[in-house]
Image (tube, helix red, strand yellow):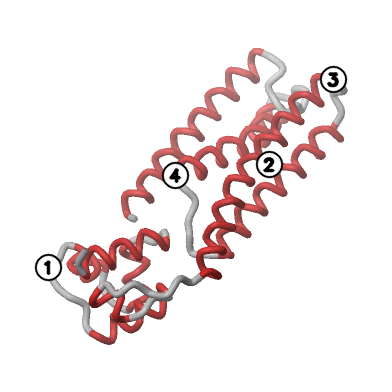
Amino acid sequence: MNIADRIQNLRKAKGISQEELADKVGVSRQAVSKWESEQSVPDLDKVIIMSEYFDVTTDYILRGIEPAVNDQGAHAVLTSKILYIASTAFLAIGLFCAFGGWYEQQTADIIWGSMIIQAVGVAGYFIGTLLSGAKASFAINWLNILLAAFMPLSLIVAVCFRSIAAPYPTEITTGVVFAAVYLITAGLSFVILKRKAKKE
C-alpha cells in the first residue's frame, strides 16, 4: 500500500469526501484527488495536518508504519454505527406502533406517542454523528428518511383533504395523493443521497 492508498483509506474510514478533506487540510479538492491518484504527493505540512486530523502518525501516512491502536477512537466509531442502526430500529418501531395503536384505538395519543419513539430514533442518529467522524451508510440514511417521513406526510395529506388525521391513509383519495407524495419524496431523497455519495 502506498501513500495514495493510505490517504484514501484514512479518508474513507473517516467517512468524509475529498472536498471535506481538502477543507480540513487547506487545499483544493483537485489536490486531494491528485494525492489519491498518485499524480502528486502532499507537502510535509499537509501530512502533519492530516496525521492530526486522522489521529495517526506521520510515519504511517508517509511510510506505512502502523500507528498504535486508538481504542477510544475505534470505540466511538463503533458506538456511532450502533446508534445509526438503533435509530432506524426506533423509527420503524414508532411507525409500527402507530399503525397497530391506531387500528385498535384511533386516538391522537397513539400518534403522539409513536412520534416520540421516532424522535428518540432521530436523536440517536444525530448523537451518532457527534460521537465520531464515521458516517451512516446510504441504506441507513435512505431508510431513515422513508421511515421518518411516512407519518408526517400522511397527516399533512389528511389535513389538506380535511380527512381523518391518521398515521396512514384511511380513504382512497388521500391514499392516492399520499402514495404520489411519498414516492416523490422517496425518489428525491434517493437521488440526493446518491449524488452526495458520489462526491465522497
As displayed, is residue 111 above or below residue 125? above
The amino acid sitting under disc 2 is Phe
Q: Is residue 88 left or right of residue 113?
A: left
Residue 102 at what x, y percent from top left? 80, 24
Which SS class for mark 2?
Answer: helix
Residue drawn at point x = 76 percent, y = 30 percent: 98
Identify the residue under disc 3.
Answer: 104
In this rendering, position of residue 75 left or right of residue 37: right
Q: In the rendered structure, which amino acid carries the disc numbered 4? A: Phe
Mark 1 or 4 closer to N-term? Answer: 1
Q: CA distance from mark 2 to mark 4?
A: 18 Å
Question: For numbered disc 4, what is the local secondary structure?
Answer: helix
| Above or below, 152 relative to 173 | below
Mark closer to the chain start, 3 or 1: 1
Mark 2 lies on residue: 90
Q: Nearer the viewer, residue 190 or 135?
A: 135
Circle 1 residue: 39
**Percent position of residue 123, x then y:** 67, 54
Q: Which quarter of the image is occupied by the C terminus?
A: bottom left
Q: Mark 4 and mark 2 in contact (Cβ < 8 Å)?
A: no
